[in-house]
Amino acid sequence: MIHPTAIVSKKVKIGKNVYIGPFSFIQDNVVIEDNCKIFGFCNLYGCKIGKNTKIGPFVEIQKNVVIGEKCKIQSHSFICEGVKIGNGVFVGHGVIFINDKIPKAVDEKGRMITTEWKLLETIVEDFASIGSGAVILPVKIGRHALIGAGAVVTKSVPKHAIVYGVPAEIKGAICPCGNIIKEIKKEVKCDKCGRIIGVEDESYRG
Ligand SMILES: CC(C)(COP(=O)(O)OP(=O)(O)OC[C@H]1O[C@@H](n2cnc3c(N)ncnc32)[C@H](O)[C@@H]1OP(=O)(O)O)[C@@H](O)C(=O)NCCC(=O)NCCS
Ligand SMILES: [Zn+2]
């Protein structure tokens, strides 16, 4: 169901059983797969949203962003061009991604800068979670990693790592079962489910 106040351009491809909430603006060649819920006041252009994903209100998603299946993108987040998000990823409220490390409005001659800037990429791998208010510079976030609320992530995050702080540092590990392990070792055993979790070192940085 598309709310009558939503504006959806003709080029948009919408799957089965999709909900688009009030005052959302969905333009260009957006693809929204089956069973997605896009809440109100969202601004989406030129992006692809995988099956069963939920996008909360007041979210902006820019062109060429790809979001996988079964993700939860909470309200007020900004996902810019250059970001690729895997399956089963949680993005908390008010998360800001960054794709331009040296932003400028005008060049030396006072001309507005339009295309002359370097787009940097961010990859969020499957099942990672990003806490509310985190700022994500162009990095790779590994599978199952957990980013704490308010973190400023300046370096790539190994799979299963918990990072937080400004700048974010590795503080522990998280098991797919949800158990937090406070040790920082290359391999740790989950005391809840017995899995061995490998938190890789900085050689992971890409
Ligand atoms: C990062 C996080 C997973 C840490 O959980 P935890 O390992 O159980 O941490 P604890 O609560 O035991 O805290 C350990 C220490 O880290 C600090 N800390 C915890 N979270 C922090 C954060 N996000 N930023 C900075 N410091 C943090 C605590 O103050 C505590 O410090 P102390 O040892 O000096 O007292 C959790 O706090 C968090 O931020 N989760 C994200 C939640 C979120 O944003 N959800 C979104 C949907 S509502
Ligand atoms: Zn476990």
Image (spheres, rainbow, N blue to C red):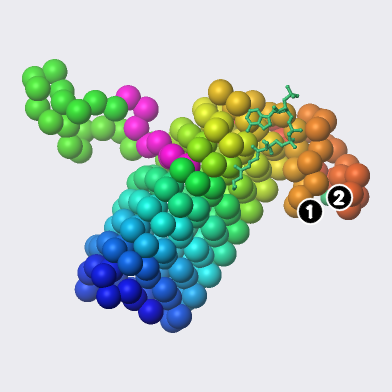
Specify the quadrant that holds the C terminus: top right
Q: What element carries label 2?
A: loop
Whole-number angstrom distance, CA of label 2 to CA of label 1:
9 Å
Tell me the kind of residue under disc 1.
Cys
Tell me whether circle 2 and circle 1 mark residues in contact (CB < 8 Å): yes
Q: Name the residue under label 1.
A: 177
Q: In which quarter of the image is residue 25?
A: bottom left
Answer yes or no: is residue 103 visible. yes
Report x, y in % for residue 3: 32, 74
Q: Is residue 127 left or right of residue 185?
A: left
- Could you tell me what secondary structure mostly forms the magenta stretch? loop
Specify the quadrant that holds the N terminus: bottom left
Tell me the kind of residue under disc 2.
Arg
Residue depth check, mark 2 versus mark 1: number of the one nearer the observer: 1
Answer yes or no: is residue 29 visible. no
Q: Does the magenta stretch include residue 97?
A: yes
- Highlighted range, magenta: 95-102
Residue at position x 63%, y 53% in the image = 127
Q: Mark 2 points at which residue?
A: 195
Query: Please, which residue is most extreme toward the top here?
Result: 108
Q: Is residue 132 left or right of residue 11?
A: right
In the depicted view, which residue is nearer to us: 169 or 118? 169
Q: Is mark 2 within 8 Å of ligand 2?
A: yes
Residue at position x 76%, y 50% in the image = 178
Number of other residues with Cα within 10 Å of mark 2, as a class: few under 14, some 14 to 19, many 20 or more: few
